[in-house]
Image (spheres, rainbow, N blue to C red):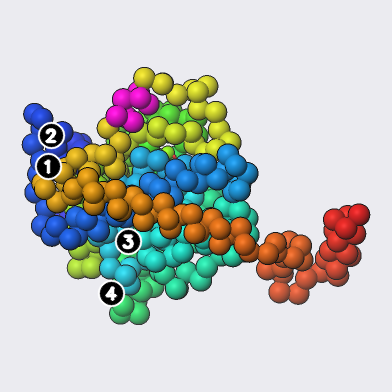
Amino acid sequence: MSQVLPAEGGLRRIIGDGDALPDGETDLTPEQHVDLYRDLVLLRTYDERSVVYHRQGRIGTYAIFWNHEAMQAGAAFALEERDWIFPSYRESAIGLLRGMPASTVLSWWRGHPAGWWNPEDYNVASICVPIGTHVPHAVGLAWGSRLKGEDRVAVAFFGDGATSEGSFHEGATFAGVMKAPVVLFCNNNQWAISTPVSAQTAAATLADKAIGYGMPGVRVDGGDVLAVYEATREAVARARAGDGPTFIEAVTYRTAPHATADDSSLYIDPERVEEEKENECVGRYERYLMRKGVLTDSLALEIRGEALETMRAAIAEAEAEPPADVSLVFEHAFADPPASFADDLAELRRTLGG
Ligand SMILES: Cc1ncc(C[n+]2csc(CCOP(=O)(O)OP(=O)(O)O)c2C)c(N)n1
Ligand SMILES: [Mg+2]
């Protein structure tokens, strides 16, 4: 008999609206609530400052994740340090939640080698820009860890568009068959650049896809950090218990352009964007914590100030890095580089020098 749970149609929520919709409960302590708030604020501050740094020409193209913070912080909060995170470009700063310096991530967006890190230092894989290609990596790591008798879960973050990719299909198929301890976390922000999710798939929900891979599909409100945390915690528990993978569809709405190089005014509905902004995820959690008496204005101010200071120091540190030598362009591609590389490098040096 199949053990597959039917995909869930409704969205899980815990945070109410402070009015007709009541708040649900969690078992988080007040300290944990504040820690989670700190994570959200750090990500929000990273994102908002990065857009400013981009406008000032201090970082390159940047994939904005404003209003995606609840999905990233909520899911990461459900993990142990030994668990692995496989981010896409949309989760570029998720390593901050594992103690990665913000200057490292800023350097990555500056195209500087100081932005490279050893994944084993944080159990955070490299930021994946090709859509969905890290899904098989996450599944393979999770399965390999299981074979080695380690108690590790891997979470792969990807978007709605990624669920149309072959890599996603291959990874999800393999995860289901091998019962890999992996969580496939889909940020359904309803856009793949300018392609709406309605043109992406004819499936009623993305979570419905899970059933075809033999895993549960869970739908959660992606703007509700507590619901995301709970859903991920359950998925992680399943994975640890040897019950295999879970697909989580966290539903949100992309309020910012796809990236700094995109003009979303050409295709996005501005009224819907304004509505979503009103209900953005950091404010929602802040209001919840205030209702619970866990957060005060002065504590919130202090936490925001700390995050701003982190970013100020980080951009200064990233900008203090000396430029990389151009020889880097030719490194890491071949163990035994072809002879032409030496000529090409010499020519490049001549060009740059001239
Ligand atoms: C394999 C591959 N094909 C195409 C692209 C170009 N591309 C960059 S972002 C993007 C949209 C992805 O949308 P989604 O998976 O929903 O993630 P989101 O950006 O919304 O988080 C595409 C097609 C790419 N990076 N990799
Ligand atoms: Mg998307």
**Distance in Å between CA atoms under marks 1 and 3:** 35 Å
Mark 1 crowdedness (10 Å alpha carbons): few <14, some 14-19, many ≥20: few
Q: Which residue is mark 4?
A: 151
The mark that comes first in sequence, 3 or 2, is 2
Q: Amino acid at mark 4?
A: Asp
Disc 2 and disc 1 in contact, CB within 8 angstroms: yes
Is the Cβ of the residue at disc 4 closer than 8 Å to that at disc 2?
A: no
Q: Which quadrant of the figure contains the N terminus?
A: bottom left
| Residue shown at 52% from the left, 62% from the top | 104
Disc 4, ligand 1: is the CB inside 8 Å? no
Which class describes the residues within 10 Å of circle 3: few (<14), some (14-19), or many (20+)?
many
| Dot label at residue 182 | 3
In the rendered structure, which segment of residues is drawn in magenta? Answer: 272-278
Whichever of callouts 1 and 3 sits on the residue coming sooner in the sequence is 3
Real-space CA distance between mark 4 and mark 2, rounded to the nearest whole angstrom: 39 Å
The residue under label 2 is: 18
Residue 95: percent from the left, percent from the top?
42, 61
Q: Nearer the viewer, residue 10 or 292?
A: 292
Q: Secondary structure at mark 4?
A: loop
Specify the amino acid type for callout 1: Arg
Residue 105 in the figure: left or right of residue 211: right
Q: Which one is nearer the viewer's eye here, 231 or 313?
A: 313
Q: Which residue extends farthest front?
A: 298
**Quarter holding residue 224:** top left
Front of the two marks 3 and 2: 2
- Dot 1 lies on which element? helix
**Mark 2 is on which residue type?**
Gly
Q: Nearer the viewer, mark 4 or mark 1?
A: 1
